[in-house]
Every structure is written in C-alpha cells, then in structure tokens.
Amino acid sequence: MTTRTEEWHADPALLSRYLAGALDAVTGSSVEQHVNRCATCRNAVGSLLEPRLVERTWAGIREAVERPSLPSVLRLARRCGLPEPTAVLLAGAASLRGAWLVGAFLSLSFATMAAYASGGTALAPFLLVAPLAPVLGVGAAYGPRQDPLEALIATAPYGRTKLILLRTIAVLVSVLPGTALLGLAIPGPPWLAAAWLGPALALVPMLLALAGFVGPRAAAAAVSLAWSGVVLGSTRALAPTWPVEAAQQGVYLGLAVAACAVIAIRAGADRQPGVAL
Amino acid sequence: MSTTPIVTDAALVAAVADEDAGALRELYERHGAWLHARLIRRCNDPEVVVEVVQDTFVALWKDARRFRHDGEVGAWLWGIAFRRMVSRLRSHRDVVLIPEWDVSPTLQQVMPSAEDQVLLGVEYGDLAAGLRRLSPEFRSVVQAVVLDGLTTKEAGRLLGVRENTVKTRLHRAKAQLRATLTEPQEGWR
C-alpha cells in the first residue's frame, strides 16, 4: 500500500452510492478493497447504514451467544430433527434420563442372565421384565409427580395427548433396541427374541387407557401386576414360552385394540383428548 | 486523523476465544456494519443478510480459537460470511445475486469523483480498465474467486457452472488482464 491510500478516505457520497448499489462493479470492488483495510471508512459505513438493522442483527447474536448450551439429550433430539420446544418437553420425562435408562438396561440384563443360566427352562425372568421396561418407562414419562415441567405443561397451549404420545414413542425408541439385543441371547426357539414385543406393545395402550381413569402411577402398578400374574401363574403348570405363544398374542392384541377404542371414545366424548389420557 | 485502535482486532479475537462477550461486541462494532454492507450488495433479501451476519458472529464466538493469527480479522470474517451465504444457494436458489457489472444508465451518470479515480489508479493501476474489458462470464469468475476469495469449487456453485469451467475462465481472464496491463502485478499470478 502506498501513502496515498492511507491518507485517502472514501467520502460519504461515494459510500452511499456503494450502499445503494449505484456503483458499477469495478468501482464497487475498488471501494471494497479500500474499506476492507481502512477502519475509518468501515466506521463511516456504520453511520450510513440503518441503525435498526445493525442492532437487530446484534440482538440475535447476543441471544445465541448468551443462551446456555443445551444438555446432550436435547442436542441429540435436535439433531434428529425435533424442534427445540419439543426436545425440551421430551427431555423432561423422568424415564428418558440417563439414570432411568441405565436402570432399565441393568434389570433387563440380569433377567437375561437368569434366563440364560437356566438353559431355557426358566424364561420367566426375561418374559416378566422385557415387556415391563417400556411400559414402566411410559408410565413414568408423564404425570404430575414425575414431571418437573408439569406446571408449565398444564398452563401451556400444548396438546397433552401430543406430549404423552411423543414421550411414549421416545421411551419405546430408547428402550426397545436394547431389549431386542438382549432377547437374542435368550436360549429357546428363535421366534422368542421377538415374541416379547407383542405384550410389550399391547401393554402400552392398556396403560394409557387406564391412566385416563386412575392416573399414570396407579395404572402402571395395575398393568405390571397383571402382567406379573400372567407370567408367574404360567410357570407352575405350563410351558415356559406359554405367555408369548400365538393364542395368547391374539388376546393381547384384542386387549390393545380395546384399549385404543377406550381412549378414542373418551377423547371423542370430551372433545379434549388430553383429559382422556 | 489516525484512528489506530488501541486494542488490535487480533487481540479482540483472542479475548473472544476466552469467552469475553465485550470483545465480541467490539468486533461487531468494528466489522458488523461493513459485513452488512458487503452482503447487501450481493443479496436481494435483507432477512438473509441479517441471518448470515448473525451466523458469522456466532461462529466467531464458537470458533475464535481457530483464527490463525496470520491474516486480517476482517478478511477472515468475510470468508465465513460469504461462504455461509453461498451455501444458502443450496436451500434457497434465489437469494444470492452477483453484483451487476453494468449499472443502469441513470445511475451511471454519477461518475466517480477525481479522488475516486485516484483510488482506482492507486489500487489497481490499469486493472479497472482491464476488468471492464472482460466478458461478463470472465468478470463474474474474477469477482467470485479473486475479489470475494471463494475457492473455485464454491465459485462454481455460486455461478452455476462446473469447477473446471471456473478454472478455465479464471485462467483465461487472468491472461487477458495480464495482456492489458503494462506490467504484471503482484498477486495475479
């Protein structure tokens, strides 16, 4: 650079013409090359721009910079394409926290080990725990006691049904793959690894339907007790695989359909689906 | 007349790397408006400009450590901003505009003052004349690669031509420019 350019500064009229796009590209580029290296002219441009535009941009920058970084669960959910408010609501669910998931996985692992050690004669531990893990997870995913965001959700215009279904899906997504992997380790017929899915998926709508009447805690307790009764009762006289054989699967399916019908009817009657759940 | 800042831009970037929000604000004061101005000249949508400048400074906040202290902060910020804007071409085909090389006649009557002519002479020698003589395809390539600092790949995406086409045009444009100049200039090899 020569001394000429250090002394020279673009006058306001030239800069205004630049901003208005009234300079041809060669002159405009020339102005750019100068202003890029000249703090005085950069400041001059600042006073010619509309201050509101510049301040609006800064407000956005400050907001992004000052916002605390999101917890890892939220960032994962955001990366999966969920909008941020939904991700926050999801992460509020007790059963989506690390501690709950680790607990569920551990109890499933122990049940799997017990079934494995027995060599296929005692499948009850696995059949008992595997369907209950998602069901209890769903039960703990919403409700006044478990939800730190409950007060917010109750007052926000956010569909309760939507929230419950969303969390249910999130719980199933987070629990089912691990359970399916453990199921592969179970001795016995190959179809067994998938058979527990039937009761697991049937128990969820039953839980949701019941929760509409007695609340999620009582409903989770009732469903767990019922399932435990089925599994433990069958160990006395019947085959180890009895709770998940075809005829029983049909019954579960029927119950699940009935539960969905109950939810639908109650939602239709109240015109407020959130009340039904 | 001299407005040499007491704290240099590079020192401010180092302060931003240590999460100093005040330094970020100071850098915005120094470079934000000019970034707006340069982007507005290249984009038809003010909302996009606002978002791109915001993205740029948020990126600065996050990646200040990555600034290699061997260049100018302003040029670095421009690099981030213009790349963001070009990458928007993928999602919104209509946002980026190349500056018009030939301004409408009414505007062109306002000729650069004598001082501006001096500026052109000092900065470019006869380069301005050489640029004006280039065909529009060549000029847009020179604009994107040489003046705006894009890679040939990015320039290809911006101009909607293949990277090899950009390289060929750039090569020929430089040869033409070299021919119009009395002597080859630094930085144009």
Image (cartoon, rainbow, N blue to C red):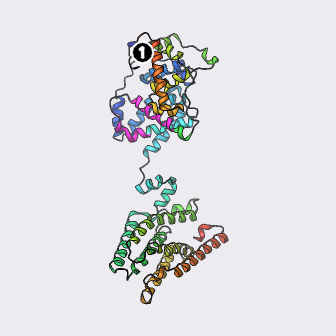
Q: Which residues are magenta?
A: B58-87
Residue B80 in the magenta stretch? The answer is: yes
Compare residues B132 and B105 and report the one nearer the observer.
B132
Q: Quadrant of the N terminus of chain A?
A: top left
Q: Nearer the viewer, residue A140 or A165?
A: A165
Q: In x, y percent, where is residue B164?
A: 47, 30
Asked if residue A206 lies in the magenta stretch, the reply is no
Does B81 appear above or below A209?
Answer: above
Q: Is residue A265 left or right of residue B122?
A: right
Extreme-bottom residue of the structure: A237
Residue A141 in view here: yes
Chain hosting mark 1: A
Number of callouts in the render? 1
Q: Quadrant of the C terminus of chain A?
A: bottom right
Residue at the spot 43% in from the left edge and 65% down from the top edge:
A177
Which image quadrant for residue B109? top right
- The location of residue A260, given as percent across then percent down, is 59, 73
Helix, strand or loop: magenta stretch: helix
What residue is at 44 percent from the left and 24 percent from the top? A36
Is residue A42 shown to the viewer in this render? no
**How far across and how far down the image is residue A31, in percent?**
49, 20
| Residue type at the position of mark 1 | Thr
Secondary structure of the residue carrying numbered label 1: helix
Which residue is at a point 49% across and 41% down the rendered structure image? A60
The residue that mark 1 highlights is: A5
Expressed as whole percent of the image width and height from the top left, the position of residue B72 reads: 37, 28
Q: Residues within 10 Å of mark 1 (few under 14, many from 20)?
A: some
